[in-house]
Amino acid sequence: MSKEKRQMALGAMMYFPAGEHISSWRHPKADAEGLLDFNYYKQIVQTAERGKFDMFFYADELYVWDRFESGVSHSNSIRPEPFSLLSALAVVTEHIGLAATISTTYNEPYHIARKLATLDYLSNGRAAWNIVTSQTDEEARNFGKDKHLDHALRYERAGEFVDVTQGLWDSWEDDALLFDKASGYFADINKLHNLDHQGKDFKVRGPLNISRPPQGHPVLIQAGASEAGKELAAAKAEIVFAPGSTFAPGGMLEDGQRLYEDLKGRMAKYGRERDELKILPGVMPIIGRTEAEAKEQLALIDELTPQQLGLDLLSHYLGQDVSSYPLDEPLPYLPEIAEFNQSKSGLQRIREILQQETLTLRQLYQRITNKRGIAGTPEQIADHLEEWFIHGAADGFNIAFPHLPGSLTDFVDLVIPELQRRGLFRTEYTGKTLRDHLSLQRPANRFTKVRA
């Protein structure tokens, strides 16, 4: 594809079911009571498909955030299970990719290989997996452990987990199934392969009891930006959900360019080409038809999070309770990363904010609750996205929404046409699978390659 015809990829992101913001459910236009209603999700994903989004991304976690009382009393703590939801959504959509967060720490490769392969079949080649290692002790305690696995060990486990999963997807060669009723041969036994994997964390014989997925391998996504996360992304990922905090006040285009080059520059040592990885920074557009309206919408969102919830969320990200510190003074210390065992990249972004700006504790928690937000008119939002896209900081964007379903509808009706007018985004789907949308090659089967 020539440079003039290069177009951005767009994901429609759902972090909390009511929107990106922890208090999205409180927004006057949010459908807070629809969070377990299938029609709510159907409307959202069909709207994203109407906007020609590459994919719908559904984030997931395996716990209720009850470390602080406010996590239960003031924030949304329920969400549907992703495979059930995306399988149902596959039936009511035709083109849009369907991606979900799945933990490598609290699952087994055979389960996940089978479920993702099934989703890929039910959606005719539209499945994707956001590979996460999970972050918190709360999750560990739901799976027979007292403490979360050490950061380095869980990324080591994740790498092996993905290797095993990909190997299981290759169990059946593409032409292994014969369905020859006359002879009675269902399959060519020579084209079915045991994986016989034995590693540090997993021992898996195989084969998988579902044939090779339509996409070969469902698309692999990774979101961690720690050193271990970057290495996993460079080795395995086909999409990276890059941190979106660089879009927020104080963020710079240069920060995005630096991360973009850092990730792409790691790929050669794994035998991969740069265009095999799409980097999609996260951004939450707050759209107004005028600048004044956009500022009003931003102010409304900033006021949705109660003070205690904001402080508790900041305490969670820091791994230390900060609620006793004065609200109108700066945080009196710079948090250290070395021994931190939650999201190291999240803590690093807070460190960068503290090093770049002098913020009070109140301003800091407001910043981290609205970490991806940019407010502006449709034209201004498009300007931001275009700048990052054409200046080597992004291959597209993972769009989050301050409230659902309304702000997604606004983006589809107001920003998408502006991007299309500039030739930056498709006007129609031209492929059938998510790999087609993203111009990603279908991987060859490892066993076919060996025999060839």
Image (tube, rainbow, N blue to C red):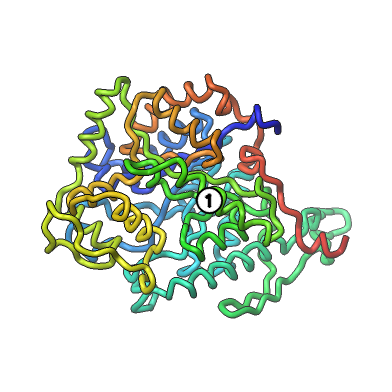
Tally of marks? 1
Residue 346 vs 439, above or below: the answer is below
**Viewport quadrant of the C terminus:** bottom right
- Observer-nearest of 88 and 109: 109
Residue at 44% from the left image edge and 71% from the top image edge:
151
Which element carries disc 1, helix, strand or loop?
A: strand
- Observer-nearest of 43 and 16: 16
Residue 372 vs 353, above or below: the answer is above
Residue 336 vs 285, above or below: the answer is below
Left or right for 232, reference 301: right
Dot 1, how many residues are within 10 Å of its Cα: few (below 14), some (14-19), or many (20+)? many
Residue at 53% from the left image edge and 19% from the top image edge:
421
Residue carrying label 1: 240
User: Does residue 131 appear in the picture of this structure?
Assistant: yes
Left or right for 333, reference 350: left
Quadrant in the rendering for residue 37: top left
Residue 383: x percent and y percent? 44, 27
Left or right for 90, reference 42: right
Residue at 37% from the left image edge and 27% from the top image edge:
410
Residue 387 vs 271, above or below: the answer is above
Residue 48: x percent and y percent? 47, 33
Residue 240: x percent and y percent? 53, 50
Name which residue type carries label 1: Val
**Viewport quadrant of the N terminus:** top right
